[in-house]
Amino acid sequence: MRPEECAIKTEELTRVFRLRKREAKEGKREILALDRVNLEVSPGELFGLLGPNGAGKTTLIKILATLLLPTSGRAWVAGVDVVEKPQVVRRYINMVAGGETSGYGLLTVEENLWMFAQFYGIPSREARRRIRELLAMVDMADRAKTKTYHLSSGMRQKMNLVRGFLTDPQILFLDEPTLGLDVQIARTIRNFIRQWLRDHPERTILLTTHYMHEAEELCHRVAIIDRGKILACAPPEELKRRLRTEAVFRLYLEGALDAKSILDGTKGIVALAQKEENGHTSLDLILTEEEVLVSILSRLQAAGGRLLALKKEEPTLEDVFLAMVGRKLSEEG
């Protein structure tokens, strides 16, 4: 697709961060944050960028939002080059990041939002109408007159989300908007995002997250990114369907075992991840076929592992990530 036909398009987008000498580790003076990223996001799409911390998600969003220059490659937002015409791009976009602390604590929620609306030139009466409607959608209508410093972190994040949608952007960047929030508030935010896009089908959202269920629940398509590289890009169901020819198992074993060492060299293991908790070991396995499980159990038992439970699972996005990267998203890179 041509750039003008896309909501977002990147070509060979690369970003390198150069470190000061005292920051360098093992003599390494550069960090490759984005490695020749090629993406196309269509108008009206809720597109997810899924990856662990440090994968390059925020770097990509900052380039698209004109807050950071690329080292090489090109990017367009709403058909406009983000390097050549950043001021034009900013007319079409807004951005909300998880954990941000925008706003003034002495102002009320309503006053903060009205102030942001004035920065964008929204007429005062229209701004107040939008504020009332959006606060109601995130269950904060009763907090409109509350001073911001009285808000919990979850309530503040909901206010930030309203601020992002207040300007009715053509393209909205949501950078881990539910980061660190409790289950109920995160669910409210996801419902709000879904409803807003249903009401504005011509708008586009780029969502970054490292919560698998969030990407699976919300996104039309997801791109899996790790160490600055796009590993796959497709609808969640298609990504999971690619694993349905494999066998996905979860094993629970008594005691702490170094299962990765025990099973090293075992044929038929596509990917393996283990976690120790409460004196037990849980093991996630993706196998080429179910028959491989027999030799795996035999090796584990010979090493002193006692099987407590065994479950065959339907593939999830977490399994897709494990198969591609060799570790679970929750594991450290």
Image (cartoon, helix red, strand yellow):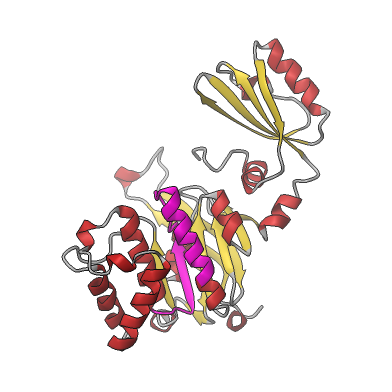
In the depicted structure, whether residue 285 falls above or below residue 134: above
Q: Position of residue 178 (x, y in %)?
A: 43, 55
Q: Is residue 87 left or right of residue 36?
A: left
Report the residue at 43% width, 50% height from top: 30
Give the residues drawn in magenta, as a range.
167-195
- Of 49 and 12, the residue lying toward us: 49
Report the residue at 63% width, 63% height from top: 221
- Quadrant containing the N terminus in the rendered view: bottom right
Q: Position of residue 172 (x, y in %)?
A: 46, 72
Extreme residue toward the left, this view: 106
Residue 185 in the magenta stretch? The answer is yes
In the depicted structure, whether residue 19 falls above or below residue 262: below
Number of on-image labels: 0
Q: Is residue 15 visible?
A: no
- Of 149 and 322, the residue lying toward us: 149
Q: Position of residue 126 (x, y in %)?
A: 34, 86
Report the residue at 63% width, 41% height from top: 322
Q: Is residue 125 left or right of residue 92?
A: left
- Of 310 and 49, the residue lying toward us: 310
Q: Position of residue 327 (x, y in %)?
A: 59, 38
